[in-house]
Image (tube, grey):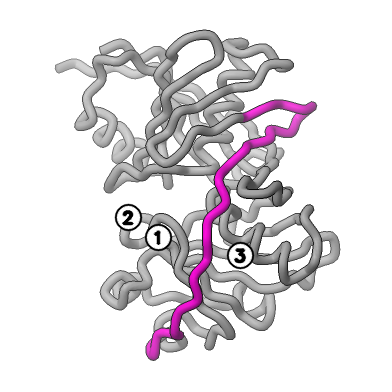
Amino acid sequence: MEIQSIFQVDAFTEEPFTGNPAGVVMVSDDITTERMQQLAMEMNLSETAFIFPQHDNLFQIRYFTPAKEVDLCGHATLASAHILYEMGRVAPGNQIEFKAKGADLIVSKSGSWLEMNFPRYPLTKRAVHPDFKALVGFEPVELYDSSYNWIVAVANSEDEIRNAAPVFNALTEAGLGHLMITAPASVWGYDFVLRCFAPWAGIDEDPVTGSAHCALTPFWAEKLSKTRLTSLQVSKRTGTLKTELSGDRVIIKGQAVTVFKMDLTINN
């Protein structure tokens, strides 16, 4: 197994120690799924991305939480593209093509901003769970099912999102273990706020969640009658995203900063 380096990148921010940290690992084809899961557990971040160069600017990408593999991850895709551009593996004027289990993804660079092209997630309205308020801390005005088992809960106010205090071990048992909560923003310059919880995948709260915007961008685009939106994820680390609805695709824009680079030594 050949592993060049492991990077930690803070995504959806231009300031270190904010945004969402992701691991990025450049690997060769002989790495096993077991080893990738072990490395993700060792990194202990929301996601660690493993990049497999194919040809030209095409890369296979796989994502692992500390507990399991997931099909798609926005912030780890952003972090991976950031490293490829920063290392000079891809020229700034060229697009990066990622083949993930969940979708084919395209990333381009404009100044300090990276632009990702993701699929739009559908929303299907569902009944409000009877224990939702007890488990999360507010009564949602609407509840939806979306792709990859996401549940979307809409609150009346930004304060309800900020003050939510989920009972994480009970969320999964109640079928709410992959939950995004959102409301109109009261902070100037932002359209909506959100927080994301995924205890089913070993992540109590994801600091900044790019893929959540595949569902939330079309939702708020319809509610607010605009296709270009700016969101604020109000986790402790916080993060800012600019998004645009483009047919059945969602354009997600963010910045990223490399925090450190490590060389891997495995003795067995």
Q: CA distance from mark 3 to mark 2?
A: 19 Å
Contact flag, marks 1 and 3 (Cβ < 8 Å): no
Q: Position of residue 9 (x, y in %)?
A: 55, 33
User: Which numbered disc flags the more N-terminal residue, 3 or 2?
Assistant: 3
For discs 3 and 2, the disc positioned in front in the rendered view: 3
- Which span is picked out in magenta? 107-131
- Measure how far apart labels 1 and 3 are at the Cα level: 14 Å
Q: Which residue appears farthest toward the front when viewing the image?
A: 247
Instruction: Say if 251 sits above or below 94 in the image.
Output: below
- Residue 153 in the image, given as x and y percentages of width and height: 53, 74
Question: Circle 1 sits in a helix, a strand or a loop, which is it?
Answer: strand
In whole angstroms, how far apart are the C-alphas of marks 1 and 2? 7 Å
Q: Which mark is residue 198?
A: 1
Q: Amino acid at mark 1?
A: Ala
Which mark, residue 194?
Answer: 3
Asked whether the residues under the numbered discs 1 and 2 touch, taking CB atoms below 8 Å apart as contact, a structural biologist would say yes
Amino acid type of the residue that numbered disc 2 sits on in the rendered structure: Gly
Q: Is residue 256 left or right of residue 228?
A: left
**168 or 29: nearer the viewer:** 29
Query: Badge 2, how many Cα within 10 Å: few under 14, some, many 20+?
Result: some
Kindly identify which residue carries mark 2: 202
- Residue 208 can be seen in this image: no
